[in-house]
Amino acid sequence: MKGRVGLILGLLLMTGCATATEELRVYTEQYPPYNMTNNGMPFAHSADDITGLCTDVLKALLAKTDLKHSIKLRDLSYGLNRTEEHPNHAIYCVSKTDERAPFFNWVGPLSSIKWTLFAKPGSSIELDDLDDARKYRIGGYKGDVMTNYLKEKGFDVLAISNNGLNARRLVEDQIDLWVADGLAGPYLAADAADVTNLKRVLVFKETPMYLAVNKDSDPDILNALNEAYRKLVESGEKEAISRAYGL
């Protein structure tokens, strides 16, 4: 009898060890300056080739755990599908929408996107609130949540499929304002259109961005991530990383 009990305990311990050594597979997308490759390529197989604000926060978080992990950069739909379908998979930095919320566990927020209206450099446009923007032509990005939000509110939004061209449209007076993220907008303007010193006219909404973890993942992995996030915030390290990116 004692032998059987010992065998059962041994099997349980082996099972626990196997669970504890499960690898967390993490995905992200190319979305500068939050997540991006070092060489500008649209994919990466190694964490060493991926940088950005959210990436730096996540790497600092993972460093406070003993979790085996990998980080790869793919397109958003690929990472979301892999994470939704496979335990011990995760994706960052994604918003916690009503549609996504039930399918994942959420760690964070790692950062946040600030919904911003930009004008061309030197513009005289001043806005006290969002309603003040109704008289202006606003450039947007087709399918983007910020663009869709303004359209649904009845604003005059002229959306195109190449978001980087909106900065050029601004300086050529084809549009009066451009709706984009507060960090990503200037980065994209400089990279895609060689436009700098955009005028930040109004921040009208903020969306927190998280690490989304598959619902059926090992609870020990989720507990380790949440505990590491708590330490990261309490130590001030998360805030320091954000400040380094101008937040």
Image (cartoon, rainbow, N blue to C red):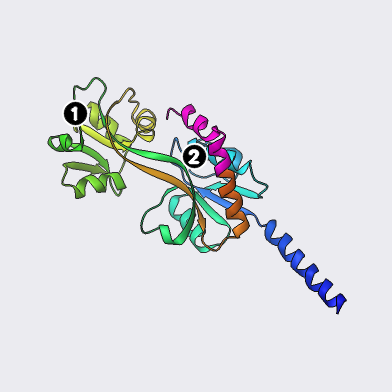
| Left or right relative to 243: residue 186 | left
- Binning the other alpha carbons within 10 Å of mark 2 as few (below 14), some (14 to 19) or many (20 upward) gives many
Which quadrant of the figure contains the C terminus?
top left
- Binning the other alpha carbons within 10 Å of mark 1 as few (below 14), some (14 to 19) or many (20 upward) gives few
Residue type at mark 1 is Asp
Residue type at mark 2 is Cys
* Residue nearest the observer in this picture, 92 or 62: 62
Q: Is residue 153 visible?
A: yes
Residue 103 sits above or below residue 190 on the image? below
* Residue nearest the observer in this picture, 106 or 38: 106
Kindly identify which residue carries mark 1. 173
Which quadrant of the figure contains the N terminus?
bottom right
User: Which residue is farthest top?
Assistant: 122
**Is residue 238 part of the magenta span, yes or no?**
yes
Q: Position of residue 9 (x, y in %)?
A: 79, 69
* Alpha carbon separation for disc pair 2 and 1: 33 Å
N-terminal-most mark, 2 or 1: 2
Q: Secondary structure at mark 2?
A: helix
| Left or right relative to 151: residue 1 | right
Q: For residue 4, which quarter of the picture?
A: bottom right
Kindly identify which residue carries mark 2. 54
| Left or right relative to 230: residue 103 | left
Q: Which residues are magenta?
A: 230-247
User: Which residue is farthest left?
Assistant: 135
Majority SS type along the magenta span: helix
Q: Secondary structure at mark 1?
A: loop
- Residue at image point 61% right, 50% down: 224
User: Which residue is farthest bottom?
Assistant: 1
Name the mark nearer the viewer: 2 or 1: 2
**Is residue 193 part of the magenta span, yes or no?**
no
- Residue at image point 64% right, 45% down: 65
